[in-house]
Image (tube, grey):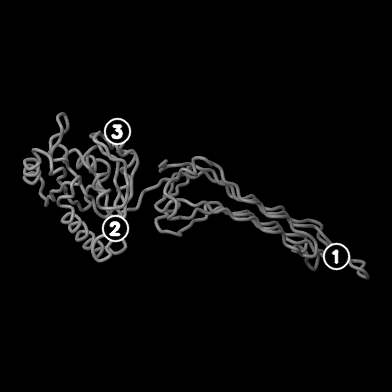
Amino acid sequence: MFIDEAEIEVEAGRGGDGCVSFRREKHVPRGGPNGGDGGRGGSIFLRADEQIGTLLDMTQRARYVAESGRAGSGKRHTGKSGEDVIIRVPVGTIVRDADRGNVLRDLDTPGQEICVARGGRGGHGNKFFATATEQTPRHAEEGEPGQRRRLHLELKLIADVGLVGLPNAGKSTLLSRLSKAHPKIADYPFTTLTPQLGIVEGPGQERFVMADIPGLIEGAHQGVGLGDAFLRHIERTRLIVHIVDVAPIEGAPAVVEAYRVIRNELAAYSRNLAARPEVVVANKLDLTGAAQGVKLLRETVDKDVCAISAAVGTGLKELLRRILHALKELRQADPHG
């Protein structure tokens, strides 16, 4: 199950108490203080892990508590520190403080981590308080409590290319033909209910990650249909591949209208997203009436239109060439983008 939002509560461990103790040795009738400090409480970290693809585990376990530190003991022995807790989350997880709403970290790099709750400091034992004027202190500190926080986690998939289009435009079919992904494919709308990722390999060992986003419909940015829940997943993409069905069935939006609907939804959701470089793809070239649809799209869109049939493979090599060329230019312009 694909889950891209979750809220959890984290509580770091309490620090151990300091110890009140005095030396008890043979032939030393008045031994001095030797109480050790308490151990540090365990902290809680979030770590981005490439092996994790969803926030499902966070919904099944909403609270994480780290181990408290042990109390200090005599002979200046410091108590054992509590074990840290490391919570593995998908790469691309945005961590927010649920109460304040501020972003703590965007874990967009494998292995990146953040301490979200710091363990409490251990209390000092009575040895710490010994001075020239107070040589036998009979008090020690209690350990400090660990931090507690409510966190809101939001996953934004990291892909080089994002596929967009109306339901049943052929996005899943294209992803399956260009990569080794196996998304659900059928001839009815909303086949894709969760984002799908695939790794596409081109000539010369070139590769990129492509994301298939559930079909958008008019009003998606306002919560209509499925798209508003998944538009966030193409915010990180370098390139948008916009697929248009040029042989729509009766009752479906016409070719030009289909293109306009998606463009409007992208702009309404985010200006930055709408300004992302775009490759326009006329799909279903193998169906009757497709040639006229391609002609209309090319007359309307002020961009090159790549005509393909994802189902039978027509034009896929040319489309792959265009995508790789566009990605190469984007990476040269902004290597860290």
Percent coordinates x, y for residue 252 in the rendering: 17, 32
Percent coordinates x, y for residue 32 in the rendering: 84, 66
Q: Nearer the viewer, residue 200 or 328?
A: 200
Circle 1 sits in a helix, a strand or a loop, which is it? loop
Indicate which label's residue lies in the foreground, 3 or 1: 3
Q: Is residue 216 above or below residue 106?
A: above
Number of marks present in the image shown? 3
* Residue 124 position by quadrant: bottom right
The residue singled out by tag 2 in the image is 208
Percent coordinates x, y for residue 61 in the rendering: 54, 42
Percent coordinates x, y for residue 287 in the rendering: 12, 40
**Circle 2: residue type:** Phe
* Residue at position x 74%, y 58% in the image: 72
* Residue 125 position by quadrant: bottom right
The residue singled out by tag 3 in the image is 225
* Residue at position x 64%, y 54% in the image: 41
The residue singled out by tag 1 in the image is 23
Q: Nearer the viewer, residue 210 or 124?
A: 210
* Marks 3 and 1 in Cβ contact (< 8 Å): no
**Counting residues from the N terminus, which is met first, the one under dot 1 or under dot 2?**
1
**Relative to 299, 240 lies left or right:** right
Q: CA distance from mark 3 to mark 2?
A: 29 Å
**Counting residues from the N terminus, which is met first, the one under dot 3 or under dot 1?**
1
**Counting residues from the N terminus, which is met first, the one under dot 3 or under dot 2?**
2
Q: CA distance from mark 1 to mark 2?
A: 67 Å
- Mark 3, Cα crowd under 10 Å, few <14 / some 14-19 / many 20+, is some
Circle 3 sits in a helix, a strand or a loop, which is it? loop
